[in-house]
Amino acid sequence: MREVWLPWPPKECSPNARVHWSKRAKAAKQYRELCCIAAKHWKLSADGIDGRIHLWLDFYPPNRQRRDDDNLMAAFKAGRDGLADALGLDDARFVCHPWLKDEPVKGGKVHAWITGGGPDEQR
């Protein structure tokens, strides 16, 4: 399987969140573990992909609040690490392609999938 559905990153992981560092660290650790477990449950696999791995991310927000993709990627850092943990590889191999969807989904979701190949590969 090359795709997985993940929960929305916790608000404490956002770079705009004004929380104590220990609360942010705890939220990030839990989200990383949750994403790792989800990836293993979905049997996410990078078998047969050599070199760079394209990580495609569709962010379905929980509400209509305005967001930007650079903050989403920062908030998703622990999730990215969890996916790398599940795949047993260094997350430096990922080339991320984030896409923030317009329509909200109750609770928010992140659809992630991986592909290999060169930079011109289509989605």
Image (cartoon, helix red, strand yellow):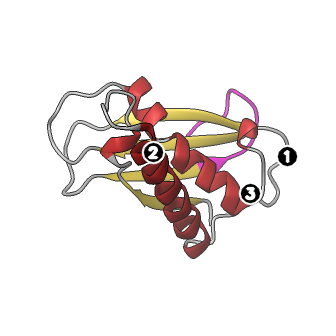
Residue drawn at the location 61% of the way across and 71% of the way down: 40
Q: Amino acid at mark 1?
A: Asp
Within the image, what quadrant is residue 119 found in?
A: top right
**The magenta segment:** 114-123
Counting residues from the start of the chain, the first of labels 2 and 3 encountered is 2
Residue 121 belongs to magenta span: yes
Q: Amino acid at mark 2?
A: Ser
Q: Where residue 111 appears, x then y in whole percent?
A: 43, 52
Q: Which residue is mark 1?
A: 50
Mark 1 surroundings: few (<14), some (14-19) or many (≥20) residues within 10 A: few
Farthest-out residue, left: 64
Q: Is residue 65 left or right of residue 81?
A: left
**Which quarter shows the N terminus?**
bottom right
Distance of label 3 from label 1 (alpha carbons): 8 Å
User: Which residue does the numbered mark 2 point to in the structure image?
Assistant: 22
Q: CA distance from mark 2 to mark 1?
A: 37 Å
Q: Residue at x 48, y 43 (%)?
A: 57
Q: CB of mark 3 within 8 Å of CB of mark 1?
A: no
What residue would you read off at disc 3? 46
Query: How far from the left and from the top, in percent, is residue 58?
Result: 41, 43
